[in-house]
Image (cartoon, rainbow, N blue to C red):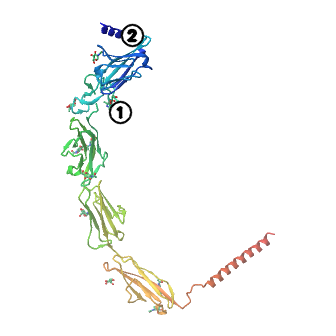
Amino acid sequence: DASTMARVALLCLLASIGKNLKSSVHAGVGSNVTLKTPIQDLQSSALFWHFYDGKEIITVASVSSSTLRLNTSYEGRAWINAANGHLTLGALTQQDSGEYIITIVYKHGQSDAAKIRLTVSEPVSNVDIKSNVPDAIEYNSTVILTCSAIGSSLSFKWINGSAPIVVDGTRITEIKVSSTLTSSSLFVFYGPDDVTLTPANPPKFIQAGSTFNLTCSASSLPPASFTWYYNGTRIETSSSVLTLDMIKGYTKMANYTCRAENPKSKRSVPSPAVSFAIMEGISSVEIIGPTGFLIASNSKANLSCQATGGTVGKVDWLKDGKPLGPSSPRVVFAADESSVLISPLQKDDNGRFTCRVSNAVSSKEAHYNMEVIYGPEQPTITAKKAVEVNQQVELTCSAASVPTANYTWKLNGTATTTTAAVFIIASAAYKDAGTYTCEAHNIITSKTTSTSHNLSVQGEGTLDGLSDGAIAGIVIAVIIAVALVVVGVWCYCRQKVP
Ligand SMILES: *[C@@H]1O[C@H](CO)[C@@H](O)[C@H](O)[C@H]1NC(C)=O
Ligand SMILES: *[C@@H]1O[C@H](CO)[C@@H](O)[C@H](O)[C@H]1NC(C)=O
Ligand SMILES: *[C@@H]1O[C@H](CO)[C@@H](O)[C@H](O)[C@H]1NC(C)=O
Ligand SMILES: *[C@@H]1O[C@H](CO)[C@@H](O)[C@H](O)[C@H]1NC(C)=O
Ligand SMILES: *[C@@H]1O[C@H](CO)[C@@H](O)[C@H](O)[C@H]1NC(C)=O
Ligand SMILES: *[C@@H]1O[C@H](CO)[C@@H](O)[C@H](O)[C@H]1NC(C)=O
Ligand SMILES: *[C@@H]1O[C@H](CO)[C@@H](O)[C@H](O)[C@H]1NC(C)=O
Ligand SMILES: *[C@@H]1O[C@H](CO)[C@@H](O)[C@H](O)[C@H]1NC(C)=O
Ligand SMILES: *[C@@H]1O[C@H](CO)[C@@H](O)[C@H](O)[C@H]1NC(C)=O
Ligand SMILES: *[C@@H]1O[C@H](CO)[C@@H](O)[C@H](O)[C@H]1NC(C)=O
Ligand SMILES: *[C@@H]1O[C@H](CO)[C@@H](O)[C@H](O)[C@H]1NC(C)=O
């Protein structure tokens, strides 16, 4: 029949349309699209819009002599622009996808045709990634990530951070596009990696009771659990920090290691070992020495240095801050230096003795003041030999002695009332001249030594120093004398050497 004939004609037309006249339009479900015609002036032509969905051809609309006909099934969702014939389709559904054929019949009988491919696609939504395993474990797990989405003509692209994921054949073996797709953003349990101890190089000896800590750390997800070993033997703690308190009683030099374990993968990695020994610090030191009187040349002294707490590493003896060496046969150290015997004592042994006890972790010292009794030695008197009458005179006597000597004075062999080191004559008289004798007495050694000094008392003015005028006179006299000598020598030379 006629309509079948028309369809066949249209299909032939469709097949004959050149590529140039083809165009394609994409639109989303629910949107509006306007399919355009190349017509400038519709007045002079008739126009048909047909739709071909691959099965049958439907007449959508026609315009002829300004009469517009729309297929009833398109009413309300298709509009024809009467001026240019453009077809607007509204609220698109996927069923609107297909070819739209426009046929123009010009007044003089010629005709033209074009087709437009409309693709109505559903927008992408509900994009989701699923993993085949709940928890991925580093090294162990093979993970299949599946991406799913709603939408038509979907294509998938996998991204790790901002970089595309590529099949490397080793770790990423396949990216498949199928109804369910493989790949995602992923939560991988890893570690423990980089298991380290802090400090990595502790001192060889650690003072017992100090705040020293060993800290074990590892990079791990979930966080690692820790176990500690002492020469390979387990220490009962699961803390990441090993305090000295936890290894109380362990003192020997040993290797300490920590193992970090990932609780998920059960993978366990040891830290490098650190080795140290724990040592008690010296808590106190004292010097035990003689307590009675020590008499020079008679007594001896055994100084014993006693330390409590800790291991004694080294004992140093000092006297008045300087190392005490076995400088003389009188000074003998015990083999372990814990005591020193000085025999016999001499006056030079007076002073402050120090014993310094140290070990790898601490150092303590004690002091002992040695007082060796000696003397008095021969005193010396410091005074003028001659004074003028009415001058003040001081005679000072001193004699080396421990304890300090008492002094008494005699004049011309007769005792005076002065019992001090200094004999003072407020105003000298002629009768004060004579032989002054100072006697030094040591109350403990009961020794007395003495020395004498002759003092002469002279008339006023006789011992005056030279006046400024006299000095000037002498200087001038010397200059003149030198001048005369020079002149004399010059004259002499002139005579001898004409
Ligand atoms: C499509 O066109 C119709 C008529 O012009 C309009 O009422 C409607 O809002 C349009 N829809 C969209 C999604 O633009
Ligand atoms: C109008 O469209 C319907 C389908 O939407 C179709 O079955 C019918 O044949 C069309 N009418 C004409 C005259 O082509
Ligand atoms: C993802 O990116 C990280 C950081 O760039 C990289 O270390 C990792 O190997 C990547 N993973 C995959 C599966 O490409
Ligand atoms: C050692 O660890 C303890 C307990 O973790 C902490 O209180 C202390 O401050 C740590 N000491 C040092 C020196 O890090
Ligand atoms: C730890 O090992 C070292 C070397 O093998 C050994 O000298 C030390 O005595 C050991 N310490 C303990 C407490 O066993
Ligand atoms: C610690 O370990 C090292 C190497 O394993 C070994 O040479 C050393 O003797 C060990 N030291 C102690 C104190 O165990
Ligand atoms: C990981 O693999 C190792 C060796 O292949 C295995 O011993 C271990 O049990 C595995 N861990 C888990 C959690 O499957
Ligand atoms: C010095 O005293 C200490 C402690 O009393 C003692 O052990 C040591 O033998 C004494 N030395 C001598 C030489 O008497
Ligand atoms: C020495 O002097 C002290 C105090 O100055 C005194 O107690 C002592 O008796 C004196 N000894 C002699 C022997 O004069
Ligand atoms: C001591 O002797 C000298 C002469 O030797 C004499 O001049 C002086 O007066 C005497 N002094 C006393 C106090 O006897
Ligand atoms: C002091 O004078 C006497 C005689 O007057 C003399 O014998 C003695 O040697 C003199 N002493 C000193 C230290 O000069």
Quadrant of the rendered image containing residue 163: top left
x 27%, y 26%: residue:
182
Q: Quadrant of the N terminus?
A: top left
Dot label at residue 372: none
Q: Check disc 1 and report the residue beneath it.
A: 162
x 77%, y 71%: residue:
493
Q: Secondary structure at mark 1?
A: loop
Percent position of residue 141, x then y: 24, 30
Q: Nearer the viewer, residue 155 or 64?
A: 64
Please state if 188 lies on the left or on the right of 386 as rendered: left
Q: Decide which of tag 1 and tag 2 comes sooner along the chain.
A: 2
Quadrant of the rendered image containing residue 80: top left
Q: Check disc 2 and report the residue beneath it.
A: 16
Q: Secondary structure at mark 2?
A: helix
Percent position of residue 260, x then y: 24, 40
Q: Amino acid at mark 2?
A: Ser
Q: Is mark 1 within 8 Å of ligand 3?
A: no
Percent position of residue 176, x then y: 28, 23
Q: Residue furthest right?
A: 498
| Mark 1–mark 2 distance (CA, rounded to whole Å) | 48 Å
